[in-house]
């Protein structure tokens, strides 16, 4: 019997279909002037996409 996953969870199969549609992050285009270690590091694309799907499916604000 297959394990049931929540409707907002991005499965590996779904991510394989979506990943080619997400633009690649290119840090070479922009030059930021800030202290080393300042700011937040970027989040992985899959994590951000899963958060977007969560908001769309649950309707939370």
Image: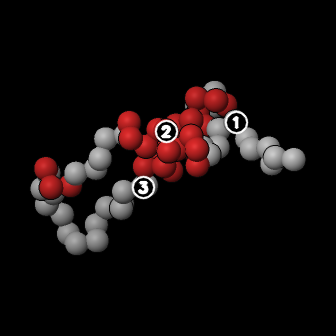
- CA–CA distance between discs 3 and 2? 20 Å
Give the secondary structure at mark 3: loop
- CB of mark 2 within 8 Å of CB of mark 1? no
Counting residues from the N terminus, which is met first, the one under dot 3 or under dot 2? 2
Relative vertical location of residue 55 with respect to residue 36 in this rendering, above or below: above
> Which of the 4 quarters of the picture holds residue 40?
bottom left
Residue 36 shown left or right of residue 4 in the figure: left
What residue is at 18 percent from the left and 63 percent from the top? Answer: 34
Q: CA distance from mark 1 to mark 3?
A: 22 Å
Q: Which residue is mark 1?
A: 7
Quarter-wise, where is residue 6 in the image?
top right
| In the image, farthest residue toward the front | 1
User: Which residue lies at the image location 38% right of the left edge and 36% below the top edge?
Assistant: 21
Q: Say which residue label 3 marks.
A: 43
Depth-wise, is mark 1 or mark 3 nearer the camera?
A: 1
Q: Residue 45: x and y, percent?
A: 42, 49
Q: Secondary structure at mark 2?
A: helix
Of the residues under marks 1 and 3, which one precedes in the sequence?
1
Coordinates of residue 16 in the picture (x, y in percent): 50, 45
Instruction: Give whichever of 46, 33 is nearer the camera.
Output: 46
The crowding category of the residue bearing disc 3, from other C-alpha atoms within 10 Å (few below 14, some 14 to 19, many at least 20), is few
Label drawn at residue 17: 2
Cα separation between marks 2 and 1? 17 Å
Q: Secondary structure at mark 1?
A: loop
Q: Estimate how packed mark 1 is, as few (under 14), some (14 to 19) or many (20 or more) residues with alpha carbons within 10 Å.
A: few
Q: Earlier in the sequence, mark 2 or mark 1?
A: 1
Q: Residues within 10 Å of mark 2 (few under 14, many from 20)?
A: few
At x 28%, y 66%, the residue is 38
Where residue 50 sits in the image (x, y, percent)? 55, 43
């Amino acid at each position: 019997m297959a394990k049931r996953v929540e409707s907002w969870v991005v499965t590996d199969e779904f991510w394989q279909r979506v990943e080619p549609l997400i633009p690649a992050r290119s840090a070479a285009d922009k030059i930021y002037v800030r202290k080393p270690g300042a700011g937040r590091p970027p989040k992985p694309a899959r994590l951000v996409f899963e958060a977007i799907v969560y908001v769309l499916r649950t309707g939370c604000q």
